[in-house]
């Protein structure tokens, strides 16, 4: 997610954040398009109008994504940044067809807006300035939407292609992205004389080529059984078997070609060292993480906790949770961190929010702990959630008991 200074607001219950870099780039592009203006004042006015058109158009585009994702049960948020807009949400529970529709919804809105403006104005007599405004609206909404539908990741067309081909054809998706990206970048630079299109699609092509390499490396690691070994190591971390993790993770580190697998092995090894009291070695290992490769949020938080920084571990897991992490072990660790800090009510809130990924047994363990600690109001809320989701009679009994105890302990008015 882009970081920096920005302003925030909400549309239809969806958080929207506009970074200051968005306005800077939008105005600069507007000024570059106003070089033929009759006066500096009119050039600035055109730039401001252009920035407003871009802002409204991108917000509508991203709302297309966000509202469709919301309809499929996701919790989207929108960010406008220097390179355009981004709607982020967790798509793990969506079908491939739903993911395709979410990706298509943004350009579809842009095309509908552009077509509506064209139909409303193409037979109307327009002055020069009004004509420039209409042309700008049509370019941003129709022109860019069509470009955005090209099958190149990370553009919408690329995400639509990825959803259509599926995860098993991820290498094919990356190869197509690289090929089309190179072609569009060359055409953008030499035919359309647009360095901006060349830069956007050229960088996308480079990233796609790197993705091809990563996927091939992962295929080698998978055939060597390293991903399966890593699953066992993670289970050993969860069970607290530091010596077992120590040997296995060193073996994976020496053999792994995939940065993500190597990072997870580094984290597991750092956790083992931290757990065995070797904090200096653990911190040295953290410096070996490949920064551009993904890391396992649970393992990283487990390392921070083992190094005596539970607050950092909590912050790490909360940030990952806000970005859609649904890892049950990570949620169990987050709940445990809150409970150890005496924030049992907050632990129960997390259990309620994440009950689907936690499962009944883990949520019930949180409920039992809340009852033992006398957090009856929180326990009653969690028990009600369990009853609504699983309908078990024992949960209903516990809900009744927690509610009665909560009422008994309620302060007199």
Image: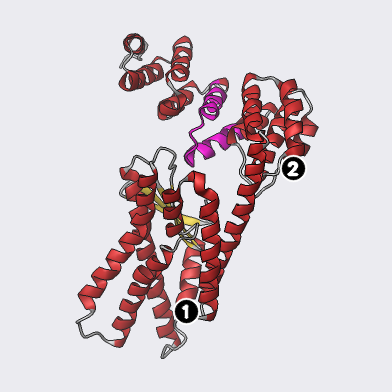
The residue at the far bottom in this view is: 38
Per the rendered image, the range of residues in magenta is 312-339
Q: Marks 1/2: CA distance?
A: 44 Å
Q: Circle 1: is it few (<14), some (14-19), or many (20+) Cα within 10 Å?
A: many
Residue 286 x, y percent position in the rendering: 72, 39
The location of residue 269, given as percent across then percent down, is 73, 31
User: Per the image, is 412 magenta?
Assistant: no
* Residue contact between numbered discs 1 and 2, judged by CB atoms under 8 Å: no
Using a 10 Å C-alpha cutoff, classify the residue at mark 2 as few (fewer than 14 neighbours), some (14 to 19) or many (20 or more).
few
Q: Is residue 1 above or below residue 341?
A: below
Residue 10 visible in the shown view = no
Residue 203 at x, y percent in the picture: 58, 64
**Labelled disc at residue 31:** 1
Camera-nearest residue between 193 and 353: 193
Vertical arrangement, residue 70 with respect to residue 112, above or below: above
Q: Quadrant of residue 38?
A: bottom left
Queried whether the magenta region covers residue 334, the answer comes back as yes
**Residue 18 coordinates in the image, percent (x, y):** 45, 58
Task: Name which residue lies at 38% across and 41% down.
Answer: 95
Location of mark 2 (residue)? 287
User: In the depicted view, which residue is nearer to us: 342 or 38?
Assistant: 38
Would residue 73 be visible to someone looking at this image?
A: yes
Q: Residue at x 74, y 38 (%)?
A: 255
Q: Is residue 153 left or right of residue 121?
A: right
């Amino acid at each position: 997610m882009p970081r920096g200074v920005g302003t925030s607001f909400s549309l239809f219950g969806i958080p929207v954040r506009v970074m200051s870099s968005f306005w800077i780039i939008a105005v600069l592009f507007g000024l570059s398009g106003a070089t033929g203006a009759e006066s500096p004042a009119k050039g600035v006015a055109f730039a401001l109008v252009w920035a407003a058109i871009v802002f409204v158009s991108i917000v509508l585009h991203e709302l297309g994504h966000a509202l469709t994702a919301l309809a499929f049960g996701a919790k989207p948020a929108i960010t406008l940044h220097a390179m355009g807009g981004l709607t982020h949400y967790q798509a793990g529970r969506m079908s491939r067809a739903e993911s395709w529709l979410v990706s298509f919804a943004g350009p579809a809105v842009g095309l509908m807006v552009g077509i509506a403006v064209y139909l409303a104005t193409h037979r109307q007599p327009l002055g020069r300035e009004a004509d420039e405004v209409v042309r700008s609206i049509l370019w941003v909404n129709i022109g860019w939407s069509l470009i955005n539908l090209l099958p190149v990741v990370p553009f919408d067309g690329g995400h639509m292609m990825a959803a259509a081909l599926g995860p098993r054809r991820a290498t094919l998706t990356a190869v197509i992205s690289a090929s089309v990206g190179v072609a569009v970048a060359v055409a953008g630079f030499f035919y359309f004389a647009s360095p901006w299109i060349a830069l956007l699609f050229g960088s996308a092509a480079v990233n796609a080529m790197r993705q091809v390499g990563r996927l091939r490396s992962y295929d080698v690691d998978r055939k060597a059984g390293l991903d399966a070994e890593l699953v066992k190591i993670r289970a050993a971390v969860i069970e607290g078997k530091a010596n077992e993790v120590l040997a296995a993770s060193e073996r994976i580190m020496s053999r792994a070609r995939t940065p993500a697998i190597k990072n997870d092995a580094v984290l597991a090894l750092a956790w083992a060292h931290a757990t065995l009291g070797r904090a200096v070695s653990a911190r040295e290992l953290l410096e070996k993480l490949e920064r551009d490769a993904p890391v396992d949020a649970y393992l990283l938080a487990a390392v921070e906790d083992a190094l005596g920084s539970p607050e950092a571990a909590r912050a790490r897991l909360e940030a990952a949770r806000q970005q859609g992490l649904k890892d049950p072990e990570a949620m169990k660790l987050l709940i445990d961190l809150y409970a150890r800090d005496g924030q049992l009510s907050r632990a129960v809130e997390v259990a309620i929010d994440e009950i689907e990924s936690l499962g009944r047994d883990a949520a019930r363990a949180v409920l039992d702990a809340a009852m033992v600690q006398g957090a009856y109001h929180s326990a009653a809320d969690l028990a009600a959630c369990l009853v609504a989701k699983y309908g078990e009679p024992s949960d209903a009994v516990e809900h009744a008991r927690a509610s009665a105890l909560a009422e008994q302990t309620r302060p007199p008015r």
